[in-house]
Image (tube, rainbow, N blue to C red):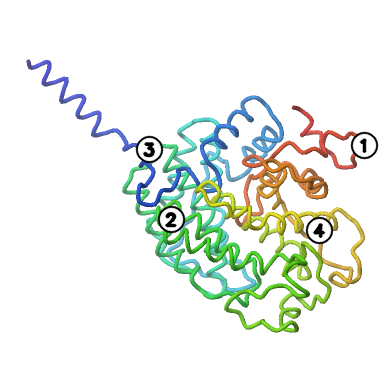
Amino acid sequence: MRRLIALIALVAGLLAAAPPPPPPDDIRSGFQHPGVLLDLDQLDALRRGVEEGQEPQAAAYRRMKESRYAAEDYRPHPYKTVACPPYKNPPACTAEREDAIAAYTQALLYTVTRDRAHARRAVRIMDAWSKVMTDHIEGNSALQAAWSGSTWARAAELMRHTYEGWPAADASRFGRMLRHAYLGEYAEEVADYNGNWDLTMIDATMAIGVFLDERRVFDEAVRRFRARVPAYFYLRADGPVPLAPPGGKADTPEEIREFWFGQRTFVDGLAQESCRNFQHVGYALAATAHAAETARHQGVDLYGEVRERLRATVELHARYQLGEPVPKALCGGRPQLTMGPDLEVALHHLRGRLGLSMPYGEKLAASMRPAGTDDLFVAWETLTHGVRLATCTDRTDRVDCHDQRRP
């Protein structure tokens, strides 16, 4: 009897010491987990691709593993208040974005290797911030909170739902940080701001809503997506001038032209910031695709509502980024060709799932592979969403696709 009692006590002690299992899908919200940008099927495919040496995942994984974000001795630098004035980049702002990317990087490394050391690093970074972080301030606070918040939510979603070693109390504290120090920033009215702000905040709102199992937050992001995306990416069906963002001051044709940086000729795929620079259009494309991908995992087909806008925008900007002469009627013929590694998630759906023809988008993505990170909110998307591109099977193509030719 004493042996039986001792055995029961031992088992009880082991159970008490064991970390709690990942929480199940929240019945009230109906969300699927993990479901922020990536779901379980994608995580399994990513892992198999790396293990079997498939491209583009193998090369993308090597690049991620060699990055500073993957360092074994990576140390977070949390701040209580993140103050981000416009056109400046104080240490707190850089640290927040980089630590969020590092947490996401370590979470992806854990996904591939199942090495718990990576998971512990990801959790350590997130815990360091959730213990002290309380607020964002200054003029760029909303955008900063969106860049970092969208990445934090991706990392947290992976850790909470694929790793049993993050105590529920710590995960809940991280959730409270996202709720109180991030979500409130996205409530700012930004209809008159350049659209990449609103689209990045929509991406972050949706991601945080899923992590928090907050259907109301998710639905608000869907509403804002449907209002802003058609007012950012133009199609001729919209009329002679683009649609105005709801709630903004630019509503007459002339005001809308000025909002579009003085552009007076509108073609399919032009974006509100095309004549500012292609870099910010890339941010907007990435944020829009992130939100649509997350929504798709939750049973909402936002892609279906905007796919022609996305396809046209990718093709138009990729064509000129690759060097085709720009007509003078578009941005005076001299746009700033500064697009970054922002196309992978959009191509994953439009080219990979739907099979749409996107030759310019494919060529541009191939020329940037394996895509790394923009150090803001786009990270390792060749690894997570890269599809084998048709252009890379053509040996006469001028794009160097040597990393893509393996089946």
Report how far apart the C-alphas of labels 1 and 3 lie in the structure. 50 Å
Q: Give the residue number, with chain letter if any, for mark 4.
A: 316
Q: Amino acid at mark 3?
A: Gly
Report how far apart the C-alphas of labels 2 and 4 lie in the structure. 40 Å
Q: Amino acid at mark 1?
A: Thr
Q: Which mark is residue 290?
A: none
Question: Which of disc 1 and disc 2 is earlier in sequence?
Answer: 2
Question: Which of disc 1 and disc 4 is earlier in sequence?
Answer: 4
Q: Give the residue number, with chain letter if any, for mark 1.
A: 396
Report how far apart the C-alphas of labels 4 and 1 lie in the structure. 23 Å
Q: Amino acid at mark 2?
A: Trp
Q: Give the residue number, with chain letter if any, for mark 2.
A: 129
* SS at mark 4 in the image: helix
Q: Is residue 362 visible?
A: yes
Dividing the picture into quadrants, the one containing residue 47 is: top right
Report how far apart the C-alphas of labels 3 and 4 lie in the structure. 46 Å
Question: Which of disc 3 and disc 1 is earlier in sequence?
Answer: 3
Q: Position of residue 294 (x, y in %)?
A: 54, 50
- Give the answer, above or below, for where 207 lies relative to 104: below
At 59% across and 75% down in the image, what residue appears? 246
Q: Give the residue number, with chain letter if any, for mark 3.
A: 165
At 56% across and 50% down in the image, what residue appears? 101
